[in-house]
Image (tube, helix red, strand yellow):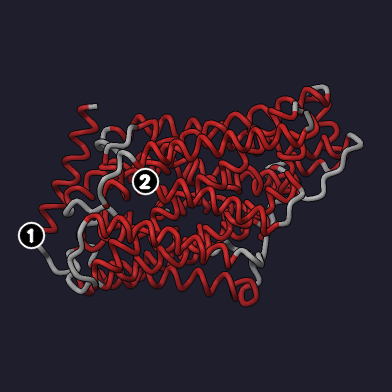
Amino acid sequence: MSDQTYLIIALLLYFAVMIAIGTFAYRRTTDHEGYMLAGRQLPSWAAALSAGASDMSGWLMMGLPGAIYLAGLIEAWIAIGLTIGAYLNWRWVAPRLRSYTEVANNSITIPSFFENRLHDGTRLLRVASGIIVLVFFTFYVSSMMVAGGEFFRLAFNTPYLTGMLIVAGVTLLYTLIGGFLGASLTDVVQGTMMLLALLIVPVIALFSLGGVGEAFTLIREVDPARLSLLGGEAMSAATAIGLVSALAWGLGYFGQPHVIVRFMALRNPAAATTARRIGIGWMALSLLGAAGCGLIGIAYFNGTEHELGNPEHVVLALSQILLHPLVVGLVFAAVLASIMSTVSSQLIVSSSAFVEDLYQVFGRATSQKTLLLMGRGCVLAVAVVATLLALNPGGTILELVAFAWAGFGASFGPAILLSLFWRRLSSWGALSGMVAGAVTVFLWSSYGPEIFGATLYEIIPGFAVNVLVAVVVSRLTYRENAEIEREFQLAAETARRKKAAA
């Protein structure tokens, strides 16, 4: 049996499992709320692994190892910032958001939560939030389509377009039929596959080189600075900006709809504690494995006769060289899983933004069956637009993901934190800050380096501008509202009570 046959068997098995899970979820999804939020009955372990798998995406298996292969451990600051941000997100936001979304008129989307939390009668906040979700997720899904096309080009030497369409088609199929529950359950399987692949590949590569000492020697021969978290340089202004930018990735967690929607789907606020422990454990091991693949790849491809064409393919290339073809197929499936898990989650959140936060705001009363069909239709539409954008990709996978991550972090992050922990936030303050943050990300990404001569990650100025504008405008427009005060206090007390009971 040829190596290619083993790869095909592994991928077909993976595709079959994903579609089977989607079918299982389809049979348990009967209405629109179930399609969008699984009836708020997601177990802790499912929420934790689903949040991690949908969050990490193709950059965990391709983007991050490739960046570390090129620059060394200085790129690991992104992983450090993400781990800190994820931990704080689970600890601070998860229990409070789970409680508050139920108190605030049982909100099932982030835009509807903003409207209900702030009692925005104009509906502008909900509409603006829905538009931001659709815009940035279309870019985000497109970046994952790019990763899928690159994956198949390396694995099967297929044209980029063919690979991208296969990823889009299979992901779309199980997402259309399974909804949020299907996306979450497939994420659990995909997250487990990703973790195992990122632990197995660097360990096998390390043994093949003769151990840690030999690997470090080979890396030093290439560039000793690759083993330094500071890049082997004195702390210059450029280095400091780079480190701050890498750590700032952690800020993005507070505003990622496809991550925080898992908090809303938990069975109760107390479940966030167990989910946090599982999720952060999975994340720490996965990031260590990804960093290890990139670092050991430096030693392997410079200490052997093998060559690496694209740094973002280091995990795939190492597995092809070192593992049995069937295991290689499973590793390749894990890389594909990292891509598809993110796409499915983002399609569901995009669908909810359209149906819940745009159509229902302007449309007439509609039956649950019709809303369910519209939700599936929107999943299809966003996937098609994202695929068209991915036909001519610009930039690396990491760069594409970074832009969308910054967009959500800078527009929604401050709004989420202020909504949960500052009772004097006004609807006009939240709206103004959100728009200012999103616009700042676009402008800084396009003109920031030229004007300021610095490569500061756009999430930092975007987040800061959002907070400043939101606080200033809220101070000017806030009016006391007894019902808002009651809900704020009730949400806080419920979260504390459930946490204490756990």
Residue at numbered disc 1: 482
Q: State which quadrant residue 419 falls in.
A: bottom left
- Cα distance between the residues tagged 2 and 1: 35 Å
Q: What number is the disc on residue 180? A: 2
The mark that comes first in sequence, 2 or 1, is 2
Which residue is at 21% across, 37% downward? 496
Relative to 126, does residue 484 appear above or below in the rendering? above
Front in this rendered view, residue 115 or 153: 153
Q: Position of residue 285 (x, y in %)?
A: 56, 31
Which residue is at 57% across, 57% downward? 401
Q: Is residue 79 left or right of residue 225?
A: left
Amino acid type at circle 1 is Ala
Extreme left residue here?
482
Which residue is at 35% across, 48% downward? 261
Q: Secondary structure at mark 2?
A: helix
Q: State which quadrant residue 412 falls in.
A: bottom left
Front in this rendered view, residue 201 or 187: 187
How packed mark 1 is, by other alpha carbons closer than 10 Å (few <14, some 14-19, many 20 or more), is few
Q: Is residue 68 left or right of residue 432?
A: right
Relative to 200, does residue 311 appear above or below in the rendering? below
Q: Is residue 401 left or right of residue 88?
A: right
